[in-house]
Amino acid sequence: MKLTINPKYARLRGFTESLPRIFPTSTGGKTLYEGRNIVKLYTQNGQRITVKSYGHLTLFNRLIYGSLRKSKAERAFRHAIRLQCLGIDTPEAIASLEIRRFGMLRDSYFVSAYTDYLPVSDITASFPQNPDSQNMLDQLVGFLVELHRTGVYHRDLHIGNILYRCDTRGNCRFQLIDTNRMTFHHRLSQRRRIENLRRLACETDAYLYILKRYAEATGADTHSFQLRGVLLRLFLEAWHHLRHKIKMAFRAIRPGGRTDSAIAER
């Protein structure tokens, strides 16, 4: 067991160390999300805590994460701390926990403070019908510009991984989540910035507006910036579609996988 804990939350050491035992059960936790990874909400001494368990790993990845590379949980923990040092808001990191067996990573958990911020996808989905959405998107663009100005390249900059909260006067704050896949640089080129923005995967109207306002905020040519952003997004979507088809084909022919005839019978 390898535990990395924020000294501010040393009182939660016992709880964190108990995760391999309590997380697979329903003991005291509420499931917020369940897919490849599982996210649960716990309450400890009146404080709400989010725990993310990273999905089952292949044998190859167990070996890699067990010896050559930091686990997703540890990277999420360290990146969250670094983001806050850079002035980029993210739920406060509490701890990361890794469970190894025979030198291979078996399970890993990232523990953070709970956030009640909402997904930015609520804003992009209502644009331009909602009269308040334009002001919110303008503030989102300011957040993205600042994110890139500090040299942060979030490899999962999906619109669902940006959260927001606005006060009664319409001033919004934003947070980043899913922080395990990111890199930090002294400076990001315009090409790298556009490549990063293409991952937003939001509605077309909102995406074009974000590109336009981002270009204006950074002094780039608006039409060229939008065109490159659209083309890069189309290429990314085509690649994801192709990769999905390859995965499905592989699963159909591997031992234990479903064949086309088996699928057709269902």
Image (tube, helix red, strand yellow):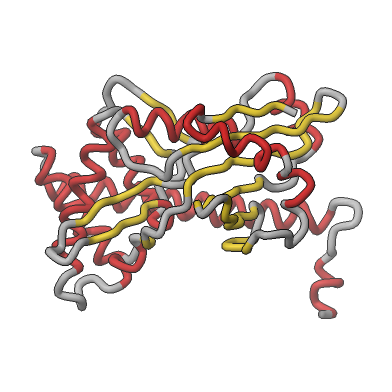
**Farthest front residue?**
45
Residue at 37% x, 52% y is 162
Q: In what quadrant of the picture does the C terminus appear?
A: bottom right
Residue at 25% x, 52% y is 173
In the rendered image, residue 145, in percent from the top left (x then y), is placed at 21, 40
Q: Nearer the viewer, residue 165 or 14?
A: 14
In the rendered image, residue 29, in percent from the top left (x then y), is placed at 65, 59
In the rendered image, residue 130, in percent from the top left (x then y), is placed at 20, 76
Residue at 59% x, 48% y is 51
| Number of marks in picture | 0
**Farthest right residue?**
255
Q: Nearer the viewer, residue 134 or 44?
A: 44
Residue at 72% x, 20% y is 67
In the rendered image, residue 44, in percent from the top left (x then y), is placed at 58, 51
Q: Nearer the viewer, residue 27 or 215?
A: 27
Vertical arrangement, residue 123 with respect to residue 154, above or below: below
Vertical arrangement, residue 65 with respect to residue 122, above or below: above
Left of 185 or right of it: where is 222?
left
Left of 19 or right of it: where is 235?
left
Q: In what quadrant of the picture does the N terminus appear?
A: top right
Left of 141 or right of it: where is 178?
right
**Res. 224 image quadrant:** top left
Left of 43 or right of it: where is 234?
left
Q: Nearer the viewer, residue 120 or 52?
A: 52
**Res. 96 image quadrant:** top right
